[in-house]
Amino acid sequence: MQLPAAARYHTGMKRHSRRALFVASLLATLAAPPLFAANDLPSLGTVAESALPQAEENRIGRDILRSLRGDGDVIDDAEVNAYLADLGGRLAAGAQLPGMRFAFFVVNDRSINAFALPGGVIGVHSGLLLATQSEGELASVLAHEIAHVSQRHLARMQEGEGNRHLLMLAAILAGVLASNASNGEVSAGMVNAGVGLAASRQLAYSRDFEREADRIGMQYLTAAGFDARSMAGFFDRLQQTHRHNDNNAFGFLRTHPLTGERVSEAQNRAQGYPLRMRADSQDFLLMREKLRLATLSAAEAERHYRTALAAGRFLQPGATYYGLARALLQLGRHDEAQQALASAQRQLPPHPALLLLGGDIQRAAANLDGALARYQQALQQFPSNDALWLARIDTLLQARRSAEARQQIELALKRAPDNAALWRLAARSYGEADALRYHAALGHAFYIEQEFESARIQYQLASRAGGDDFYLRSTVEARLREIDKQRPAKPR
């Protein structure tokens, strides 16, 4: 539903205000004196830790991600999240950082960009996923960002530049946070203003880190089984396209300046790795099209897919039919959506995303029993697929079969106890009938997402609710004590 102009303006102003407050607090935090004085110990890790402790990096990254989620900029889709976490996890394994908990997410933004936030939080714009022509190209960008994290570039830049770099960082992060609340020119201007605060030595320093991220990221890329040439090829294609179409869509070229020398170095370095011919995974092909529906209207997406099919311009025809089916589903044309899905299934081997879409079409057509049957059949083939579990449980709740839904939730939580979406469904299943379990389940969801203050509120409500479940009450009290320990001490 389209909001009235006044409402859209008011909503935009609220989002701008929240971002402004957040960036202001971040700027104040970053501009504060370092917690530890710089020292001359030779260990890279020790020097980086003295400049910006890992715990502080984790906190900053978590706060930024929470702000992005709160403003609705992060695409919250179980299938997309699972794919990105799996691909990112395979690449991050090469970094051999057992204490680092990487988090990968997609920002709903058409521009071509990606960024590494402090604490291993890595964001990818949906526009970048759509711009990639192979899974190797996407993996190369993630590997590059993972290398920024593994080499502690943020902390090392702070160690070398002190508050000058922190002011630049705050301005750049402000641009990232404003990317969806305003047009690209404003965001690029904020980023460029931040860069303008740095001296020429700082810019050279950043180029050195970019080269290091290229080199080490290529190691992660090949260790995960991808061809090293994917990185150099993608960078070169972006640079060549940018020369003929210089606009703000290529945010990656602004935040990761690509020189001809850097591209040549990457191309030469790739020659030292064996050639690997690797087909794109079905996950990549399907999730890429699912994300297209997040960046285009359903009508625009239908036109795109019909044009692509007529002209034969696509990475894979089955994935294109899958995207068309999702567009038709959004338009409410259920029979046509089912026909397009059937075409996709003729082109592709069985896949949970195709089976999930079949259930979604039945559900949208108000055939809840048919949807439940399809989800159950799909789970028999793919019993560990989170999106199928969530869809089946959600449909059971929609059909007012709460007791059966709770049984399914218990089974799913045994397999995936850290799934926040499952805990939210659990809360829905209890509702007002069981305040203790309702608030405890919501508290668990917020806790898993590291929304600790929101978790505290829900746990406190649970502790005051009636009920005699001793084990659950003990868990709630333990979580409250754990959250208290993580709160920063108040200044005296």
Image (cartoon, helix red, strand yellow):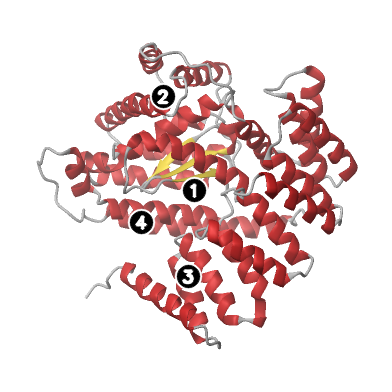
Q: Would you say residue 473 is visible in this rendering?
A: yes
* Residue found at x 72% / y 29%: 348
Judging by the rendered image, the residue that carries numbered circle 1 is 177
Identity of the amino acid at label 2? Thr
- As drawn, 323 above or below 247: below
Name the residue tied to disc 4.
59
Which residue has dot 2 on it?
A: 222
Find residue 455 and name its label.
3
> First in sequence: mark 4 or mark 2?
4
Structural distance between the alpha carbons of marks 4 and 2: 31 Å
Give the residue at x 38% y 24%. 218
Q: Quadrant of residue 353?
A: top right
Q: Nearer the viewer, mark 3 or mark 1?
A: 3
Q: Categorize mark 1 by other alpha carbons within 10 Å: few (<14), some (14-19), many (20+).
A: many
Q: Is residue 166 left or right of residue 17?
A: left
Furthest residue in direction front, as rendered:
380
